[in-house]
Structures are given as structure tokens and as C-alpha cells.
């Protein structure tokens, strides 16, 4: 049974008939046995009853009710609904290309409509630092700007900027109004070219390097052997976390090539001192020091990308974001009790063309990754879909790439698998075009959503030729090759 709502409510009982919505009084009832996000929306001829534990459930009931009443009449029904997963995230990369605060708010508003509850904000990377800082002013004068626009559309112009603390607080407050937590990501030890350009002493070699202007994976990363690196990270996190009063913080940990660590005396000395096996374990040691600080001094829970598991020694309290795990480490981690977020590259990376990742493929993805046992299934806490912006320079392009695929991820986050149906999703989707346009978001045309075989093949070839630079491919496919060469 289907109403025009995304995500599909988990239980709908139709009483039959409909009534004019404007004439109905609404009664709110508290039920303390409900989960925080659960709601019941009971629409009778003469009144509407909303049952929830508190404000969150009420909020989701309201979103559902507003959609049901958009045409004036509302069907008489009882909806009993709660999410499949507690973590339903969307990520925006504001490091490679920035969005204005107004654009970010539009995106948040759209995500809220589909009952997302986490905004993961990727605020620093090799190509730019984007948070106002008083503790480290050179992040603003140096790390926030790159010499030219880059990423293949080089117009020679300097590119950059950062969000002021006031702007970030404004976004955070906006999210709070929509029951969305904001998780900042401070990616470390890799993807730190911009930071190192401002503070070269934080890298192993201490050499001056420019902010990156192209995509890829860069060899200069934070040195794991220098105490001043840890002091820098702690002080930086102190400052950043003042802006984000939420449960989680994301510390990245992806794509950190170890060439520099292999040939750095200080890194090697830590390996020896701590009895670590190799540079992979050194990344685990690095992560654990940051995690311990965040947990014990700041009271935070920590999220990290799945490469963090490669060391085999990372603290089991860390929540792992599974974007690309070829060796089932995430399933193993979940089976042993570790928490995992499903963020699969092949299904949820919205910067890839529809030809590579059609809507149906995104929709059909099961967050229950392979090799999970019953315990492991319980430890998949949710889904997240990122938009990386190397090749997404403006907001129109971003909307085209993300809508409607973000909406498909939203349904997987909320609607239990047994209640999902692609045909029904497609039908319901059409009723959202007007709502999204009223927010300022234009979806990709329907003809683009599920392209045919030829378009798909073309997109795959084009993407690999145009977008991935040879350095990125080589480090990605042969992570150890450069290390050997460098020694
Ligand atoms: C990632 O896409 N490097 C997390
Ligand atoms: Zn080092």
C-alpha cells in the first residue's frame, strides 16, 4: 500500500475516504515507550492525532502530514513509522569547491524533507581549508586558497575562501531546527596538503608545498613521529569543535600513502618505541591518539573512513564509514561489535555520472554489506551519501548529480528493506519535483535517471579518462609501489 511519501512509511492502514486538511484539529500525545524518532499519525474524519516520545517523532510526523496535505485533502489513515537506521547522513565536500551558505541551506532543507538526520561537512582537503581559525591564522591566508581553479577546468584564477565561524554557527542552527546533527570532518593524516602548505613543519620532510590544484592522492601527509603534529591536531580540534555541539566528529583517515613515513626517522622511531609492526600500524597508533583525545577530553564519538581498519589496532569504539573495502574488514569489524556506516562508492558516490551509478542501482543497494552475521547486521548503524566536488563546481550541477539519487539513499535509511519497492519509489518521486523547485533545487531530468547500456558504457570510459589523474590511479591501484621507489 502506497501514499505519495518518500521515504515510504513503514506501516500504513487506510480507513478509506479523505477529508479537507485545513479543518482538522491536531492533538499531540506522548508515549514514552516510543523510540526518539518513531511516530504515529492517525488521521480521522474529525481530528488528527500525533503520538511520539518527544519533539523528533513529532517533527517526522509533521513532515509526513505536510506532504499528505499538499493538495488540500488528506486520506483517512493511520501511519505507524520509525526509521530502519538511526544514522541517515549526507555529505557535502566544501573543500574542493565551496557552496554559499544559502546553497547549503537549500540542500539541507531538501535532505530534511527525506528525513535525513546527519550533515557530514567535509571542510578540509588537499585543495583547501575552509574553517575560520584564530588558533592557526595561516590556514586562512595560505591553506584556504589555491593558485588556480584546477581539476581540469583551469582558468588560471586563484580559488578559495573559508566559512566564518558566524556562518558555520548559522548552518548549525539551521540544521538543529530540522533535527539534523552536523559532523565536521577534519581529515588526517592524509589529504592534508593544504594544512601542510601553511605549516610545512607538520610533514615528515618539512618542505614547503603548494595547496593542491588537481585531484588525487598526495604523498605529503602529517608526520606521525612529531609531537607538535599531535599538539596541532588537538588544538585545532579544540577550536573546531566549539562550533559543532554534536555527538560525533569525523577524523578522515582515508587514502594516506605511507611513502614519507617509510623514510622518516621520526616516524620510524615511533614504530620502534611503540613496538609497532609497520607504517600501517603507525596509522592505527596515530588514529588512536586522536580518538583517545576526542573521547576522553572532548566527550565525542569518532567516525573514520574504512582505511583506518587496515592497521588492525584501531580502537573498537570508532565508527567506520565504509566507502571502499575490498577485503571485508568492515563486515569483520561489525561482526565483532564495531559500528559501521554504509557509504559505498559504487552506489552512493553522487559525483559519479548516472551512467555509472543509475538511480536504480543507488536505490537497490543494501546497507547490509556482504559477510555480515546476525550480530554484524545489528551494527550497521546507517547510510550516508556524499557529493565530492572536484568536478562539481556550482550548485546547479550539484543538484543535478544529487537529485534524485540522494532521495533513494534517504529511503534506504528510513524504510525497512522489506517495505522498499523501486517501481513505487519512481512513482512517488514525481510528486516531489514541485516541492524541490520551491526550495531551489532542480532534479536531473527523468530521462537521465536510469540510462541505457550505451550511455552507461560511455560514461564509464569518459569518467576514467577525464577525471581520474594518472597519479591517483597509480597510488590507488599500487599503494606500495611508490614506497619502494622512494626508499
Ligand atoms: C574517500 O572517498 N576517499 C573517502
Ligand atoms: Zn614522519
Image (tube, rainbow, N blue to C red):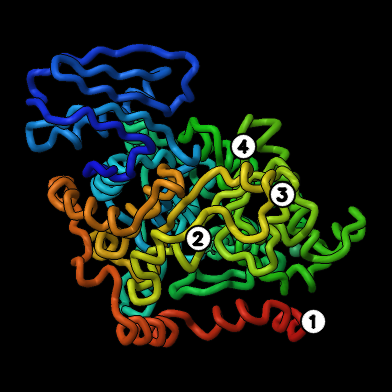
Residue labelled with disc 3: 335
- Counting residues from the N terminus, which is met first, the one under dot 3 or under dot 1? 3
SS at mark 3? helix
* Mark 3 crowdedness (10 Å alpha carbons): few <14, some 14-19, many ≥20: many
* Mark 4 surroundings within 10 Å by alpha-carbon count, few (fewer than 14), some (14 through 19), many (20 or more): some
Q: Nearer the viewer, mark 4 or mark 1?
A: 4
| Image quarter hosting the C terminus | bottom right
Closer to the N terminus: mark 2 or mark 1? 2
Asked whether 371 or 230 is in front, the reply is: 371
Q: Secondary structure at mark 4?
A: strand
Q: How many angstroms separate mark 3 from mark 1 (CA)?
A: 38 Å
Residue hosting label 2: 125
Q: Quadrant of the N terminus?
A: top left
Identify the element where label 2 is drawn. strand
Q: CA distance from mark 4 to mark 1?
A: 37 Å
- Closer to us: mark 2 or mark 4? 4
Q: Residue at x 33, y 58 (%)?
A: 422
Q: Please give the name of the residue rendered at 67% of the width and 70% of the height, measured from the top-left corner.
A: 257
Residue receiving disc 4: 301
Q: Are marks 2 and 1 in contact (CB under 8 Å)?
A: no
Measured Cα–Cα span from mark 2 to mark 4? 22 Å
Q: Are marks 4 and 3 in contact (CB under 8 Å)?
A: no
* Residue assigned mark 1: 487
Indicate the position of residue 29 as horizontal and vertical percent values.
34, 12
Find residue 179 and report its horizontal and vertical position in percent.
37, 31
Lateral position of residue 118 relative to residue 284, left or right: left
Ligand 2 within 8 Å of disc 1? The answer is no
* In this picture, residue 482 sits left or right of residue 93: right
Question: CA separation, marks 4 and 3?
Answer: 20 Å
How far separated are the C-alphas under marks 3 and 2? 32 Å
Q: CA distance from mark 2 to mark 1?
A: 26 Å
Amino acid at each position: 500500500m502506497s501514499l505519495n511519501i518518500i521515504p515510504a512509511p513503514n506501516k500504513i492502514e487506510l480507513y478509506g475516504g479523505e477529508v479537507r486538511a485545513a479543518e482538522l484539529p491536531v492533538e499531540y500525545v506522548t508515549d514514552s515507550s516510543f523510540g526518539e524518532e518513531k511516530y504515529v499519525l492517525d488521521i480521522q474524519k474529525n481530528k488528527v492525532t500525533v503520538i511520539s516520545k518527544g519533539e523528533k517523532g513529532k517533527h517526522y510526523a509533521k513532515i509526513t502530514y505536510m506532504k499528505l496535505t499538499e493538495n488540500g485533502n488528506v486520506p483517512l489513515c493511520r501511519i505507524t513509522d520509525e526509521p530502519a537506521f538511526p544514522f541517515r547522513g549526507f555529505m557535502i565536500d566544501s573543500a574542493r569547491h565551496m557552496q554559499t551558505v544559502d546553497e547549503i541551506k537549500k540542500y539541507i532543507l531538501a535532505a530534511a524533507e527525506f528525513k535525513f538526520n546527519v550533515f557530514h561537512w567535509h571542510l578540509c582537503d588537499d585543495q583547501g581549508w575552509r574553517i575560520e581559525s584564530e588558533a592557526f591564522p595561516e590556514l586562512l591566508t595560505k591553506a584556504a586558497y589555491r593558485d588556480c581553479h584546477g581539476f581540469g577546468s583551469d582558468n588560471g584564477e586563484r580559488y578559495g575562501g573559508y566559512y566564518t565561524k558566524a556562518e558555520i554557527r548559522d548552518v548549525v542552527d539551521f540544521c538543529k531546527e530540522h533535527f539534523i546533527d552536523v559532523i565536521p570532518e577534519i581529515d588526517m593524516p592524509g589529504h592534508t596538503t593544504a594544512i601542510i602548505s601553511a605549516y610545512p613543519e607538520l610533514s615528515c620532510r618539512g618542505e614547503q608545498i603548494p595547496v593542491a590544484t588537481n585531484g588525487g592522492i598526495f604523498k605529503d601527509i602529517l608526520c606521525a613521529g612529531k609531537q607538535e603534529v599531535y599538539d596541532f591536531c588537538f588544538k585545532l580540534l579544540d577550536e573546531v569543535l566549539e562550533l559543532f555541539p554534536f555527538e560525533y566528529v569525523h577524523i578522515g583517515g582515508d587514502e594516506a600513502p605511507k611513502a614519507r613515513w617509510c623514510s622518516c626517522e621520526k616516524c620510524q622511531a615511533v614504530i620502534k618505541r611503540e613496538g609497532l609492526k609497520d607504517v600501517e600500524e603507525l596509522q592505527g597508533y596515530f588514529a588512536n591518539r586522536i580518538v583517545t583525545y576526542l573521547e576522553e577530553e572532548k566527550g565525542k564519538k569518532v567516525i573514520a573512513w574504512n582505511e583506518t581498519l587496515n592497521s588492525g589496532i584501531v580502537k573498537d569504539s570508532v565508527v567506520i564509514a565504509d566507502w571502499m573495502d575490498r577485503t571485508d574488514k568492515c563486515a569483520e569489524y561489525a561482526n565483532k561489535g564495531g559500528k559501521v556506516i554504509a557509504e559505498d562508492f559504487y552506489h552512493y558516490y553522487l559525483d559519479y555520472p548516472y551512467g555509472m551509478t543509475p538511480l536504480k542501482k543507488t536505490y537497490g543497494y543494501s546497507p547490509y554489506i556482504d559477510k555480515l552475521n546476525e550480530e554484524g547486521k545489528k551494527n550497521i548503524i546507517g547510510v550516508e551519501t556524499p557529493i565530492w566536488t572536484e568536478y562539481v563546481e556550482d550548485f546547479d550541477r550539484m543538484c543535478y548529480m544529487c537529485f534524485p539519487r540522494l532521495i533513494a539513499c534517504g529511503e534506504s535509511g528510513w524504510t525497512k528493506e522489506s517495505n522498499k519497492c523501486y517501481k513505487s519509489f519512481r512513482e512517488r518521486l514525481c510528486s516531489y519535483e514541485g516541492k524541490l523547485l520551491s526550495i531551489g533545487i532542480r532534479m536531473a531530468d527523468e530521462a537521465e535517471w536510469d540510462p541505457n547500456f550505451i550511455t552507461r558504457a560511455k560514461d564509464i570510459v569518459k569518467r576514467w579518462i577525464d577525471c581520474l589523474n594518472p597519479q591517483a590511479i597509480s597510488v590507488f591501484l599500487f599503494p606500495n609501489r611508490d614506497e619502494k621507489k622512494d626508499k
